[in-house]
Image (cartoon, helix red, strand yellow):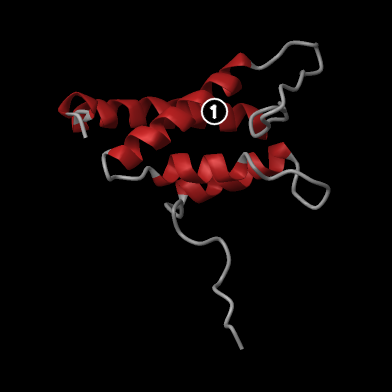
Amino acid sequence: MDPRDIIDPAQLEVLSRVFADQLLACLEECARGRRGLFSDVELLSEDGAAWPEAARLRELAFALQALAYQAGEPNVLCNEFLDLCTMHGESHPGEPRLARVFLSRIERGEVGAPTEAEKKPW
């Protein structure tokens, strides 16, 4: 690996903090009913306006995830957010509910812990 490719841990920490702050702001807005945070398809709000902050947050999450793995320090908050972005379909909760549950897990310090009990193979 080229030494120029190594990210300074202090810079990674700043980037992680910026991501966390923006994520919390978007989660709170989504929990109040705004849609488009977890979707990779650009959704329009009721007034027809796109949610550019959510799109930038997903882009930041992908970049942060790559940098964190490169530094050998995965960012569990980022990873869980990106996992939630892949959930689509009829059986999954709506975005506002998903945002409320995720906010609750963050507040309780449960991010990075399994969401379901491990199933026994027998």
Q: Is residue 11 above or below residue 87?
A: above
Q: Position of residue 82 (x, y in %)?
A: 54, 40
For numbered disc 1, what is the local secondary structure?
helix
Q: Is residue 104 left or right of residue 2?
A: right
Q: Residue furthest front?
A: 1
Q: What residue is shown with label 1?
A: 58
| Residue 103 visible to the viewer | no
Q: Position of residue 49 (x, y in %)?
A: 74, 10
Please state which of residues 82 and 51 is positioned toward the viewer in this rendering: 82
| Residue occupying the point 34% across, 33% down | 67
| Residue occupying the point 74% across, 43% down | 88
| Residue occupying the point 70% across, 14% down | 50
Q: Is residue 45 above or below residue 31?
A: above
Q: Quadrant of the C terminus?
A: bottom right
Q: Quadrant of the N terminus?
A: top left
Q: Amino acid at mark 1?
A: Arg
Pointer 1: residues within 10 angstroms few (<14), some, or many (20+)? many
Q: Is residue 12 above or below residue 45?
A: below
| Residue occupying the point 57% across, 45% down | 83
Q: Residue furthest bottom?
A: 122
Give residue 44's quadrant in the image.
top right
Q: Is residue 67 left or right of residue 38?
A: left
Q: Position of residue 69 (x, y in %)?
A: 34, 42
Q: Is residue 96 above or below residue 14?
A: below
Give residue 96's quadrant in the image.
top right
Q: Is residue 12 left or right of residue 118?
A: left
| Residue 122 visible to the viewer | yes
